[in-house]
Image (spheres, grey):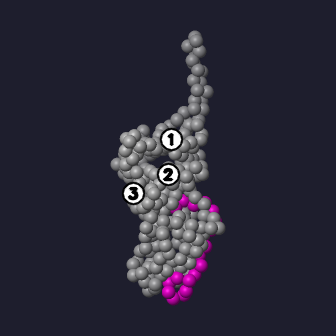
Amino acid sequence: MATQTYLGRFVIDADSKDLTVDDGVTGAIAVSLDIGKYFMAGATGETQLVEHMQAQIRLANAAFDPEVSVTFDYTTGKVSFTFSGAQALNFTVVFTDTNLRTLLGYTADFSSGGGATQTAGNEAKYVWRPNRSFSTHPVERGRLLESESTTTINVAKDGTTTSAVGSLLKRADPLSYMMLAEARIIVPSTGTVNRELETFFDDVVHKGEHVRIFPDDTATATANFTPVVIVDDSGEVGSFSDFSRRHIRNYNGLWDVDIPCRKVV
């Protein structure tokens, strides 16, 4: 069964919007992103960060259109800049705002350096990708949510029944995973960053932001994601330990995860 991709909504602010692009001919051209809320990718007819960044770079200088492309790869969770055209070997990207560089998963500014594509070393922030598929899943694999009814029914002592029709809600109860790799769950003391659920919890779930979940990360069209908020029946997010726990109490290598979700309406 396919694995999933979770995309969290986030804010681009005054400290994470600026970069410069230089093709070695026209010089360094300043590029600014519009301040606002974005998903990294995931929908057509809506501004996504990688698409907006590509558009702003191409708008900054006609020579960059279509020589610079910015994309997000669902199978790796990484952002890439691709360069083409006569000046492709001379492109340099400098992140004026290092927060933007970190958000995208890059650890340093970069030059095309003879390579057409420069891919970030780390996975992008505000993305979580479990390394296994669901352990339990109540509905067909292309869907995530099951029906929940708030209808109440009263049965009197004489057997008379009355009902008050409520609302038909959509929820996940919950999305469960077993034996996920530790690197996908907790922040490591060293090594790869941005991969773990703990960071996603702090940056997205705690902020109460919307999340787009692709049940099959090989199917990434607009129609394939489910918009949810991650919260249980209490209406409070609660502790990170409510979401994850070690699979074996005294072994830190494998973890189990439960993700309670409700549909965004």
* Residue 235 place in picture, x, y as percent: 60, 40
Amino acid at the residue labelled 3? Thr
- Is residue 110 shown to the viewer in this render? yes
Spatial separation of the CA atoms under disc 2 and disc 3: 24 Å
Q: Pointer 2 and pointer 3: residues touching (CB < 8 Å)?
A: no
Identify the residue at image location x=47%, y=54%.
187
The residue identified by callout 1 is 242
Are there few (<14), some (14-19), or many (20+) residues within 10 Å of tag 3? some
Closer to the chain start, of discs 1 and 3, is: 3
**On screen, residue 85 above or below 242:** below
Spatial separation of the CA atoms under disc 1 and disc 2: 12 Å
Q: Nearer the viewer, residue 135 or 178?
A: 178
Identify the residue at image location x=60%, y=32%.
166
The residue identified by callout 3 is 218
Secondary structure state at the residue bearing disc 3: loop
Closer to the chain start, of discs 2 and 3, is: 2
Are there few (<14), some (14-19), or many (20+) residues within 10 Å of tag 1? few
* Residue 98 place in picture, x, y as percent: 56, 70
Magenta stretch contains residue 33:
yes
Q: Where are the magenta residues, as a range?
A: 22-40
Spatial separation of the CA atoms under disc 1 and disc 3: 29 Å
* Residue 96 place in picture, x, y as percent: 58, 74
Identify the residue at image location x=54%, y=87%.
26
The residue identified by callout 2 is 198
- Disc nearest the viewer among 1 and 3: 1
**On screen, residue 158 above or below 231:** above
Q: Pointer 1 and pointer 3: residues touching (CB < 8 Å)?
A: no
